[in-house]
Image (tube, rainbow, N blue to C red):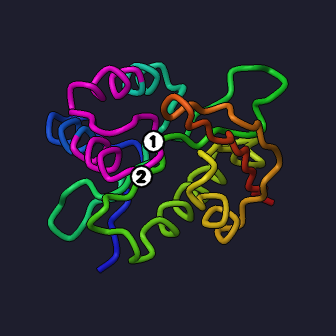
Amino acid sequence: MPLTFTLDPAVTPELRDGLLDLWADVSNAGGAVGFVPPVTREDIRPSLLKHFASMSEEKVRLLVGHDEDGQVAATAFLTLNTHRLMTHWIWLYTVMVHPRHQGQGYGRDLLAEAAEAARELEGIEAIRLTCRGGLGLERFYESCGYKEVGRIPGAIRVAPGDDRDDVIMLLPLN
């Protein structure tokens, strides 16, 4: 059953809790979304609140995918550039699909919905994201049309002695 996607949903306590659960579950399953397991909802809450603050300032757009039970199953944050020379592309952050939904094509669906949302933004020509090397994420994003355009070796320190590349990916929208 496909996910139902919503761009810029109302931020309710249910949505907040669903996003906290999603982010914690993805992180604890080893997902590369800014944390290293084990994490709790309270560890993640400050990062989510920063996203919400940026949303209220209209700097960030939230894309949420709900499953057939109405649970938050996927999400991505589309972040506008504020630098006057870079307003023709956006960032895609915190791209997540719940572990129970992995392998069903929902990641591809999420990225397609994010690209469609970006195309509807005036003047946006590309989406840029970064991903943690060493997990095969580059291959997944490439299969969705993104191109690797840069790599910073060892820029992400997961743990002492475990440095990963920061891989920069770009999706032209035209």
Q: Residue at x 31, y 68 (%)?
A: 101
The range drawn in magenta is 21-50
Q: Are marks 1 and 2 in contact (CB under 8 Å)?
A: yes
- Image position of 136 (left or right of 153): left
Quarter occupied by the N terminus? bottom left
Q: What is the secondary structure assignment of the residue under circle 1?
A: loop
Residue placed most toward the observer, 17 or 55: 17
Residue placed most toward the observer, 36 or 23: 36
Residue flagged by tag 1: what amino acid is it? Val
Q: Please name the residue that numbered disc 1 is placed on.
A: 33
Q: Residue at x 42, y 52 (%)?
A: 96
- Give the image location of residue 132, x and y in percent: 59, 45
Farthest front residue in view = 161
- Image position of 16 (left or right of 99): left
Mark 2 or mark 1, which is nearer the start of the sequence?
A: 1
Determine the image quadrant of residue 174.
bottom right
- Label 1, residues with CA under 10 Å away: few <14, some 14-19, many ≥20: some
- Give the image location of residue 9, x and y in percent: 33, 43
Farthest bottom residue in view = 1
**28 to 161, vertically: above or below:** below
Q: Please name the residue that numbered disc 2 is placed on.
A: 96
State how far apart marks 1 and 2 are (Cα). Answer: 7 Å
Residue 69 numbered tag: none
